[in-house]
Image: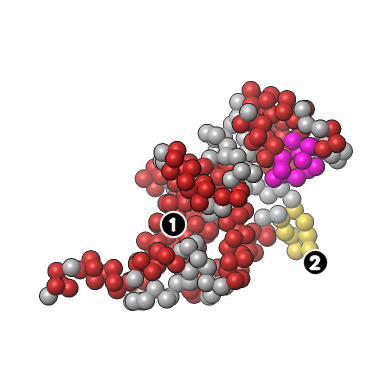
Amino acid sequence: MLRAVLPSSDIFEKFRIWKLIMSTFAFSSTPELMFGLYLLYYFRVFERQIGSNKYSIFIVFSGTVSLLLEVILLSQLKDTTANLLTSGPYGLIFASFIPFYLDIPVSTRFRVFGVNFSDKSFIYLAGVQLLLSSWKRSIFPGICGIVAGSLYRLNILGIRKAKFPEFVASFFSRLSLPSLGNSTPPAPSRNIVGTISPNTGRRAEASLRSQPAPMVSSAEPSEEAIATLVSMGFDRNAARQALLHARNDVNAATNILLEAQSH
């Protein structure tokens, strides 16, 4: 009779929600750990594009929504132990594939044995490997993450405009791969399709001119690499100078421009 009066406790015990929540913080096998950490490391690029605060919102939203979807899935499949789903932050990882597909441009293309590839192909291959690592046990949480990322992209309840207090955003920034926090300063108040003021471009050029001459590459940057940086909101001339100083490395050039912008 007491159990009938406390249905919420029965549900909590039945689906072992606490176990499901804790399982998102650790991978179940070494291969999953390797591919998962690689993707988490790469997807920190979104923090540079939208800023630490909005990226923290993305982490919380994608993790919470994917967790709720997993609970609904378990209830529909009558699984009472939560063993149907593999452990790991699948919600965050696969939610990140939505902005990766829509917002990150291709910078280089190449062919291997007659098959076309791009610099994004390796990320997709790592994602497929992680998605299929435990078959159904990893496919289900991966799909939940993709749905969560799609809902964020659709700006459900205006989530993309939400912001945390700065101390909360700082906590999430340190919590999520803190070793990257010092090397990739977040971009203030702009998104991937945003614009940067002319003053920022001039500051970037001035900062680049102050760099030591030996760092400059003699090879002219490719139009694709310049277009990639321009699509992220940087001035074209500043993007070209950054690529010269970074020896045509797009990621390193992005860091140079962001550092110049923060001064």
Identify which amino acid the numbered label 2 is placed on: Phe
Please provide the residue range marked out in magenta. Answer: 242-254
Under circle 2, the secondary element is loop
In the displayed structure, would residue 90 be above or below residue 262?
A: below
Mark 2 residue crowding within 10 angstroms, few (<14) / some (14–19) / many (20+): few
Q: Is residue 99 inside the magenta stretch?
A: no
Q: Nearer the viewer, mark 1 or mark 2?
A: 1
Identify which amino acid the numbered label 1 is placed on: Gly
Q: Quadrant of residue 184?
A: top right
Q: Quadrant of the C terminus?
A: top right
Q: Nearer the viewer, residue 152 or 258?
A: 258
Q: Position of residue 209 (x, y in %)?
A: 77, 27
In the displayed structure, would residue 65 be above or below residue 2?
A: above
Q: Going from the N terminus, do you reach mark 1 or mark 2 first?
A: 1
Mark 1 residue crowding within 10 angstroms, few (<14) / some (14–19) / many (20+): many
Q: Label 1: which residue? A: 63
Residue at image position (78%, 37%) is 245
Q: Position of residue 240 (x, y in %)?
A: 76, 34
Q: Is residue 248 inside the magenta stretch?
A: yes
Q: Position of residue 249 (x, y in %)?
A: 75, 45
Under circle 1, the secondary element is helix
Q: Is residue 162 left or right of residue 105?
A: left
Q: Is residue 35 left or right of residue 153?
A: right
Q: Nearer the viewer, residue 195 or 25?
A: 25
Residue 113: mark in rendering: 2
In three-dimensional space, the C-alpha distance between marks 1 and 2, rounded to whole angstroms, equals 39 Å
Magenta highlight: main SS: helix
